[in-house]
């Protein structure tokens, strides 16, 4: 159990966190150009 969720929800939560982390790391590895549409997702205020 993770944060009060059951086993199935915990697995889905871990998978979601890994995917989000992977997306952010890839953005910096591949050095998104200013015109890339994915830049808006990883850009901070």
Image: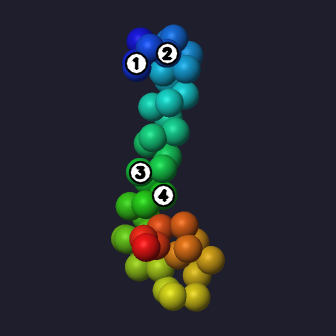
Q: Which residue is mark 3?
A: 21
Q: Are marks 1 and 2 in contact (CB under 8 Å)?
A: yes
Spot the residue most to the front: 45
**Who's the residue at 38% across and 61% down the image?**
25
Task: Name the element at disc 2.
Answer: loop
Q: Which residue is mark 4?
A: 23
Coloring basis for residues: rainbow
Circle number at residue 2: 1
Q: Position of residue 31 (x, y in %)?
A: 41, 79
Q: Residues within 10 Å of mark 4 (few under 14, many from 20)?
A: some
Image position of 23 with respect to 11: above or below: below
Q: Is 22 left, or right, of 39 in this rendering?
A: left
Which of pointers 1 and 3 indicates the residue nearer the eye? 1
Decide which of 18, 6 is in the foreground and name it: 6
Circle number at residue 5: 2
Task: Name the element at disc 1.
Answer: loop
Which of pointers 1 and 4 indicates the residue nearer the eye? 1
Q: Residues within 10 Å of mark 2 (few under 14, many from 20)?
A: few
Task: Name the element at disc 3.
Answer: helix
Q: Marks 4 and 2, Cα distance to the nearest angstrom?
A: 24 Å
Q: Are marks 4 and 3 in contact (CB under 8 Å)?
A: yes
Q: Position of residue 32 (x, y in %)?
A: 47, 79
Q: Earlier in the sequence, mark 4 or mark 2?
A: 2
Q: Position of residue 4 (x, y in %)?
A: 44, 14
Q: Residues within 10 Å of mark 3 (few under 14, many from 20)?
A: few
């Amino acid at each position: 159990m993770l944060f009060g969720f059951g086993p199935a929800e915990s697995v889905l939560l871990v998978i979601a966190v890994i995917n989000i982390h992977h997306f952010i790391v890839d953005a910096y590895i591949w050095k998104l150009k200013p015109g890339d549409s994915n830049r808006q997702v990883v850009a901070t205020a």
